[in-house]
Structures are given as C-alpha cells and as structure tokens.
Amino acid sequence: MTTRYDTIVIGAGHNGLTCAAYLAKAGKKVLVLEAKDRIGGMAITEPTEDGVLIPTCAHLLYQLHPDVIRDLNLNLKMAASSLPTIALGSDGRHLKILGETLTAMNGADLSSKDQENYTQVMRDLKKFARVLGALLGQKPPRLKNRDWEDTKTLLKLGLSIRMMGRKSMQEFLRIALLNIADQLEDHLENDLLMGVTAMEAVWGTHLAPRSPGSVLSLMYRLAGSMEGTQGAIGIPAGGMGKVSEALEQAATRAGATIRTNAPVKSLLVENDTVIGVELESGEKLLANSVASSADPQRTFLSLLGAEHLDAGFTRRLNKIRNRGDAAKVNLVLDGLPEFNGLSQQDLAAKLVIAPSINYIEKAFNHAKYGEFSEHPALEITLPTVVDPASSRSNKHVLSIVAQYAPYQLKAGWSEEQRADLGEAVIRTLEAYAPNIRKQIVSQQVLTPSDLEQLFNVTGGHWHHLEIQVDQLLMMRPLHGTAQYETPIGGLFLCGAGAHPGGNVTGAPGMNAAQRILSRKG
Amino acid sequence: MGRQAKRLATDKMNQTRYDAIIIGAGHNGLTTACFMAKAGLKVLVLEKNDYLGGAAVSLELHPGWTYSNCSYVCSLLRPEIVRDLDLPKYGLQVIPYSGGGVFMQNGDHLCNYTDHDAHRLELARHSKKDSEAYDRYSTDLMRQCRFIKPLLMRMAPDPTSFKPRDLAELAYLGKRFHDFSEAQMAETLRFWTMSVAEFLDEYFESDVIKAYYAGSGIIGTALGPMSPGTAYVLLHHYMGEVDGNIGAWGFARGGMGSISKAMAACFEDHGGEIRSGCGVDKVLVKNGRTIGVVLKNGDDYYANTVISNADVKHTFLDIVERNDLPEDFVRQVERFKIRGSSGKLNIALDGMPEFPQVPKDSPIFNGDMHFTDSIERMERGYDDWKNGTWSKDPYLDMLLPTRIDPTMAPPGKHYMTVFVQYAPYHLANNESWDGPNRDAFAQTVFNQISEYSPNFKDMILHYECRTPLDIEREAGITEGNIFQGELTFDQLLFNRPVPGYAQYRSPIKGLYMCGSSTHPGGGVMGAPGANAAREVLRDLGARQTVRGY
C-alpha cells in the first residue's frame, strides 16, 4: 500500500476508460482495474484462427458522444460512417433505407405515400430526439432538492420543448410514451418498412412494437449521431475494438494507469465511505474515490455488499430490470454469402430480418415466458465486407444480433439449448440466404447468460438496464443514485447502468467524471 | 312535404328550442344533464335506445331476472356527484360487497377477506413474505389513489397553453407533486409508466396473489399485464369508494340501471326532458356554430349548445359532417384508439352452482371470482387477442350479484355476470362474430367455469353472450370498448381525446363532449359528465352548479 490514487475506476470497458481519461486529463491520479486479460468490455474485436476479426459483442457504432471524441482527441477512423439498412423480404424484394430515403429493391412494393410519410415520421422523431439528446451529456436533473445546474437543465429542456411550436409540442407529449406500432400504423402501410422501423425501436430491450414506451426507446437510439449525421450507423476501421483502444490511448496519454487481470473482490469501506478496493489477489489499493463501470447490481451487491445499504434501497436494487433479451451469433463463412436479391455491394449494409410488426410480436411472445424464439428477428452486419482489412483470408464474418432470447430461460441455458438457438438463427437465415449453412466454417453462439459470463454484466443486458421510461434519467438506475453518486461516500457509478444508458456512447463515463471533478477535495 | 307544411313544421320546432341538447342518455350524459338542469337551463336528452342508461342499464331479458347487462359493479361513481345530485333520494342504493378470489388449477384457492387480519392470514397461506408485503402494497397504492383523485373532478390543464387557467391548474398539479418526498416522486413517475406485472413483482412472489391483483390492471384495455403502462390502469379500478371506504366496491340495488334511473329522475325533477328511441343522425352546424340536431327519423331539434355523450369517434366521424371540422382534427380523431378487448356473459341460474374445491360458506362467492391463477396465463390470453382471436383460456371476472341483492332473480335462483377478457372486435381472417363464433366464445367461458363447477352447465336457464360487436351495436361505443378509448398515456389527461381539445370543447362552437372518451376516462364514474357540465356552464355564463373548481 504505497500509493493512494485520486480515483480507482473499476472496469476497462468504454465507459470506464472514458471516465478515467477525463479524470486523468484533469490532473488526477487514476488507476483502472480490469478483471479480464484485455480492455474493451463489450466493445472488442477478436481475431480467430481463420484470420478474421470478429466483433464479439457490439458491432455497430452510432452514438459515441461527439464531446468524448473531441475532448479526448480520439484517434478513430471509420470504415463506414453511414451504412444503409436493408430490410430483407423473403422473396428477394427488399427495402433499402439510408437516412430518410427509401429505395425499393427488385420491384418491392413501396407507395409514394409511404415514402412521403416515412420521411415525415422520421423527421419528427429526430426532431424530438434532438431535444432529448441535449440531456445525454449532462447529469440528469433531480426531482427535488435541485441544484442550480439541475434547474438550468430543466428550464432549458422546457424551453426547447416550447420552442418546437404548439403543434409539435402536442405531438411530442402525445407520442412520448406511445408504442411504435401505433405510430407507424397510423402513417404507413408497408409491412416490411413498419417491421424494420419498429425493430429499430426495440433492439436490445424487453419490448415489442406494441409495448407502450417503444417510441421513446427509438428516440433514444436516434439521439446519437455519426460524424454529424443524426441517426447514422457506422463501423470503425479495424472493428469495434478500435473504439476501446482509442479510449485506452487517450487515458494512458493523460497519465492514467490501466491494469488488466486485476479483478476486484470488494470495496473497502470505512465510516460509510469507500477508501479503496481489495483485489481477488488480496492486494489492497487505496483511493479517495472509486468509480464503478460495472452494472449497478454487481457494484452494490457483489463489490460493496448489501450490509452497507439500507433495506429499501437493496430491495429496489434487486428489482431493477436487467435481463437481456438479445443473443449474439457470429458465423465465420468460407466466402461471401449470397442473399436472395442482394449484390456484393449491397452487403456493406445492416441487414434486418423483421418482416412485419406481427413477426416481431410473435418472436417476443416467447421471451415473455422464458423461451427463445424459433423465428427470431435478426440484425446482421458483415464487418469483413465493410472493412476488408478485418479479414486476412478469403473468409467472411456474419455478425448477428438475434432477438428474442431471454436471459432466464425456463429450461435453463445448456449446451443443447444454445445449439438449438444457433440452429433457429441459421434456419431463419436460410430463408433469405439458402446456401448459408454450407458456408459456415465456425460459429459462436452467445446467449445473454454467456454475455453475462464473458463481460461480467449481470443479466447479460446490452444496456446494463432496460431502456424504458421508468429506468431513465433521474430514475436510472435508481432514484437516490441517479446523479452518478451513491448512498456510500466516495463511490460513483460510471457505466451504462447510469444515465444516459447503454450503447457505445461514452456518455455515462464522461458525465460521471465531471461529477467526480465537481466534488470538493 | 309542401313548402307551407315545411314552414309550419319549422315554426313548431322554433317553439321547442332548448338551451342545450345532450346526445345519449348514458350515465355521463345524464350527469351533465342533471347539472345543467339544476342551473335552470332547458335541457333535452336524446337517447337512441328505448331505455336509458347506455352501458349502465338493467334489463329483463329472461322473465324474473334483471341483468346488469353491460357494466355490473359500482364503485367509481364519484361521491361528490351522488351527493350533489341527491341520488339516494331518487332511489339509488349501493350495497357494498366483499370477498371474491381465485379458484386455482391445483385445487386450492385464494380468498379475499375484508377483515385485514383474516386477509393477511389467507395471503400467508400462499406466501408468508407476500402477507408481509401486503401493507406496503396497500399504502403505496393508496398514495397513488390519493394523488390522482382530486384530478378526476378537475379539467386537465393543457401544457401547451398560456391561458391563466391552464397555468394555474398546472401549478396546482406541480404543487401536489412537489408535496411528495423525492422518493415518492420517483415512485409515482415509475408507477405511471410501468407494467402491472412489474409493479406487483416489487411486492409479491406468489403467482396467484399477483394474478388476483393484476386483473384490475388489464380489465377493459387492449394491453397485457406485462405491457408498460398497465400499473396505472389499476387505479381506474381502485380509486372508487362506497360510503367513504376507498377502494370498496358495491352493487347498485336493482342493477346498474338504478344509477341511470336515479339520474334520470333527478333530471326530470329539475325540469329536464328525455326522449328515448331517438337516434341522432347529424349535428347541425351553421357558420362554424352548432344550431341543433337532426334525428334518424327526420325530426330536428334546435339548441346553440349540443353535448355529445357518444365516444369521440362516433361523434366526430359519424354524426358531425366531416367538412364542418378541420381536417387535422378529423385525422387525430381517426387515430384515437378505442379497441374492443372484452366481452360479457349474463346468465340466469336455476340455483347456486357448486364449486367443490371451496367451502360452501366461503366469502369468495360474494365477490369477484376468477380462474386465472398466474400472470403468465393472463398474458397468454392477451397473445390470443393480438392474433385476432378471443382468449382460449380467458381471464374471467365473475360475480353473483344475487348473493347480495335478492331483487335481481326469483328466490333461490341466481343471476351471474361474467366479464371476459380478451375478445377482439376484429377477428382474424375477417371472420364475423355473428353466428358460430359467438357461440364458440360463450362455450369457451362455460367450459372454463365447469372445470371448477361440475353442475354449472346444468344450472343455466338462459344466457346472453355479448361480444365487442354486440356492445358496440347496443351501447353505441365504438368497438365495444368499456372505457370509450384506451387508457394509455397517449390518451390520458391533456391528450384525451385529442391534444388541444381535452377540455370538453370541440373545434365547432357550441359542440361539447361529455363521454368517457374525455378526461378522466371510463368506468361508471360520472366525472367526465360533471366536468363537461362545468365547462359548458362557464361558457354560457350560467349559474355554476358543479362544485370544485
């Protein structure tokens, strides 16, 4: 116990690294502790024996906060910064979406009315998302006992809602908690278009298109931007791992120390104040504050221990919704896949299998009862096509998010269940790419339970916690700990379980660092 | 008709001008009518059916039996209205009931006891932990009820308006909210947005206990217990009171029609005029102003104020000419969601059916009985609805009013009401409710009950099966939705029924709404009717008879 750090950051995921970089830049002495043998958390790229790079978990970048990129001077190049989305139709008649522009492929049905209304619906949503997006980069205002900064945030928000004009404000207040299916069915007719748009609203959540609140989760997704384009999606050159590497560089450049293979066993507490951490190895490290990018349950129950918390807080903590519903399937193929009706250039896109709202609803029904769907909705990217440098052979990677596959499977996740899930995904793919099975060289199926193991995220949830209105803003993760501070002095939250939430944004890390720096001492 | 005859007719009509005409004699229309008549105005109520009450009616469909053939229990009716209209004087008597519970598939049951200790003991039989959580649950729910109750009898402020009255109402709301502690504020915000399943998960672990309480979160809505937003719907079944007992339920003696009858008597006592069998065909509009109505039979009546008790879709899409309305408004009305989600069976029984798994003297038979013993079964019922078919394993809310009110059936016989959730208005593959589907729907319900009551089917003397289509045809509510519109946040408060028109007024001068499509929504509450009367009386500069604001 020789050195005392200003702040110890637990977890070298993108939020932990962002938090560390900001703190170090402000001249603080910072140590980052990572349990695994590598940094990056869920934003990593891993090489395989076949000479390809696999985005093990996250595979698209669309929300990295522009302040993070600017303030930390991130060295990040994009292989593509505005990928189109292609909604696959099983008959080869697809819809291509880029921004608000729709293209019917191979003679797909698309009325000019749908074309026009889609543009309008998305413009409105983006407008509302921008208003809410202003909140991403700050601590969420408290409901009571507000400080001046909170009041300012609220006033600004109120004003920007007012400034939209009366009609827009009415529409905003009406649809804020609406379900996306109603909003789409009120304006559109095309099943494929409604399916893919509805799916955008529910990726990574335990919601289906008819669940109230799904419009809000779409607005959350649309609040981000890529290189200045709102709602754009991209893939970094070299894969998602490059985001973490860039953040790591920024942190070390600023003077932070990063230790991998250093799992934290518990937090050291004295007089209701955290004074440091104890590692699994028994080593004790002291610090004035600890910022945890681990999920809230892990932070409070495993690392801190319920004995330091009051019963009500613990009870509420146990009830936060953090069960993942999305599985990740990575397939290595012996060559370029052939999708019905898609050319090779078309493969540089995000492909979506969610052909109608009812298809998604039916897939979701299973998840409610602890079963995985036999006909899941799929989000597919081909990183090796978008970024040829990520393959050193003629092999290709299909990176697939499959929904719905619940964390708590009634039957329990076993080797067999995992194989069945992989089979369901491949069978679903076959309807769109008939030869795909023969091309598979190797496959990796990661259930939410596997993601929990791999990334130390309780519940295996992408966003750590559900992105639903009762777990956002001043209620994320719980009221009483929503401004990155916790009931325990010196302990802060800086992960996706804190405002504004999941996806690779860096925002919780950035906001938490500001919060820590604004404290006295 | 010759020109002269026409003019004569017109003259006759001019003699029968009214201060206000109310379309529909449902309980809200009658409430509005009473308050307006009390203010000394000359009011006419027009009802399409031959009987009054809309969905609060008592009908003899089988000799000797009185059916509450739509709504069937009473609790939400605002006590302020009962008092101000002196309804007991006009014959309304509400008899509280208690009991009820769930028959479980494993042969056990859950009984709801009025006595607090007895109830906790019963809960403990299923889960000791849940019996300990019960008080916390009641307290939390009561706090939400207390928060919302004062809002029921107030106009919903428009947050986009700068009018002093809206700002004052908003400030009132803000102040009430601010009276909470920070933790209570957060709990309130969560409560308004979460699903009833998640809400109950925070208190209980036993499936059957959760299922018993979750029922109130789905009754009448096209949402499942796992859909966000259903916790709030709980309130629509909890914020009522009988004789000052908050959350209590009762039967109107003589059926729900007694409420309408008492209101009609009060109205007529104050000089009001009711015409039944008079369906309104069109609202007459001249220069953007209402001047009266034309009936289906061609008769016309004139008044500068017309108040519609019909739902917002029926009002503005059927009986108001489209080109009298702004296009934008019509579009918003078109997308208002009134979804058929439930059906109803009224059954005349030859005696008390046996339920062998429960002791004969159990209070379970005196209240609301159910057979759905887990939230999962309830949610699966909703999946059927999403697929365009009625629930194969439906959630039933079954009562025997004759256990408490002997006036509804001959001695020794019983009247049973069974509310059935879910039943869609639109069946898949464009199938029709008329014909075999209605019978199959009824059989689904009978089968569920007979699983627990071997002699139930033999006891049936007569039954009436009401699908959403039947409710629409009879009560006139679009899709037969019991709340005249979904109770989701996009359709509550200042959004109900249409943003910018949530204060009972419409784009047409002199045309108002007073039905459950308006704030605060459905249930036999009377609040929309009273609130509408307050706004109309304000606009007319008449004597204010609606107290409160």
Image: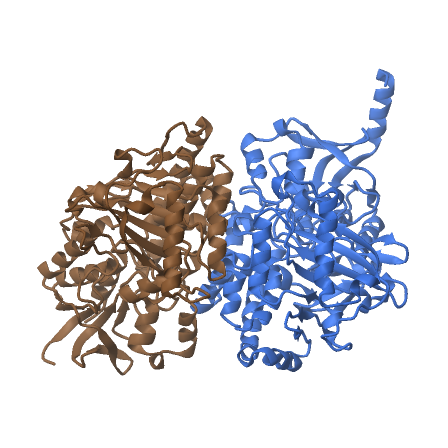
Residue A358, given in percent of the width and then of the height, sits at: 50, 45
The image quarter containing residue A456 is bottom left
Quarter the N terminus of chain A occupies: bottom left
Any part of residue B483 in sight: yes
Quarter the C terminus of chain A occupies: bottom left
Q: Report the colour scheme.
A: by chain
Residue A75 appears left or right of A305: left
Residue A439 appears left or right of B540: left
Furthest-top residue in this view: B3
Give me the chain that's blue.
B
Visual hue assigned to chain A: brown
Tell which of B379 and A21 is nearer to you: B379
User: Residue at (69%, 32%) from the top-left corner?
Assistant: B290
Residue B367 appears left or right of A196: right
Residue B342, given in percent of the width and then of the height, sits at: 66, 52
The image quarter containing residue A291 is bottom left
Residue A330, given in percent of the width and then of the height, sits at: 29, 52
| Number of numbered callouts drawn | 0
Any part of residue A160 in sight: no
Residue A162, given in percent of the width and then of the height, sits at: 41, 44
Tell me if residue B215 comes above or below residue A184 in the rendering. below
Tell which of A155 and B237 is nearer to you: B237
Furthest-front residue in this view: A438
Residue B493 appears left or right of B396: left
Tell me if residue A434 comes above or below residue A138 in the rendering. above
